[in-house]
Amino acid sequence: FVSQRPSIVKEIEVATGLVQETRREGVAMIDPDELMTDVKMPEEGTDGHATLLIAEHLANRLRDGRADPLSISELEGYVESLIRQHRHHWRKDVGEPGAAGVLLYEALGRMEMLRLIEVDPKKQAVTPLPTIGRFAVGTLRDDASPMRESTP
């Protein structure tokens, strides 16, 4: 399959208008015009910002080799810290009791529909899936500068 991948991907791109995005975990076909997308990550407002920050948090954990499930209560604590950090530019109701749970519930629902995570309701836990990796913060590197070998 690996040797045939470029020609197969090209055929898919031509036939569908999707665009190839190569990732460490494989190839994803992206819908740049969003004609085939019924659910997408929110981009604006409190819900969008919170969802992206939660996705980034889960993606960074996965990138760091921590693929183990994360408890809903731990994630809710993380969202509470986000509220403290961003409340001055998020909508006012995030200061209300229970707001962290509501923000988290909405974010997890959307991420689950996009197959970025798996939610186990019995264990009250969230497992990040490899597809969430696109939301991880990468390390910038200047490709123009030569790599230096460190000497002890």
Image: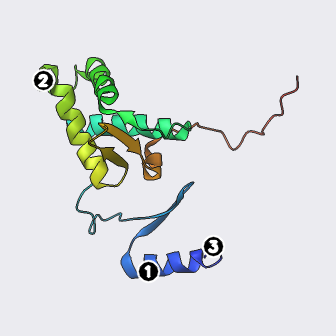
Q: Which residue type does callout 1 highlight?
A: Val
Residue at the spot 40% in from the left edge and 82% down from the top edge: 15
Residue at the spot 27% in from the left edge and 17% down from the top edge: 84
Disc 2: which residue: 92
| Residue 113 figure quarter | bottom left
Disc 1: which residue: 14
Q: Residue furthest front?
A: 122
Secondary structure under badge 3? loop
Q: Which residue type does callout 2 highlight?
A: Lys
- In this picture, residue 105 sits left or right of residue 142: left
Disc 1 to disc 3, C-alpha distance:
19 Å
Q: Which residue type does callout 3 highlight?
A: Val
Q: Are marks 2 and 3 in contact (CB under 8 Å)?
A: no
Secondary structure under badge 2? helix
| Residue 147 figure quarter | top right
Q: Which of pointers 1 and 3 indicates the residue nearer the eye?
A: 3
Image quarter of the N terminus: bottom right
Mark earlier in primary sequence (1, 3): 3
Image quarter of the C terminus: top right
Residue at the spot 44% in from the left edge and 75% down from the top edge: 13
Badge 1, how many Cα within 10 Å: few under 14, some, many 20+?
A: few
Disc 1 to disc 2, C-alpha distance:
46 Å
Asked whether residue 44 appears in the rendered view, the answer is no
Disc 2 to disc 3, C-alpha distance:
51 Å
Mark earlier in primary sequence (2, 3): 3
Mark earlier in primary sequence (1, 2): 1
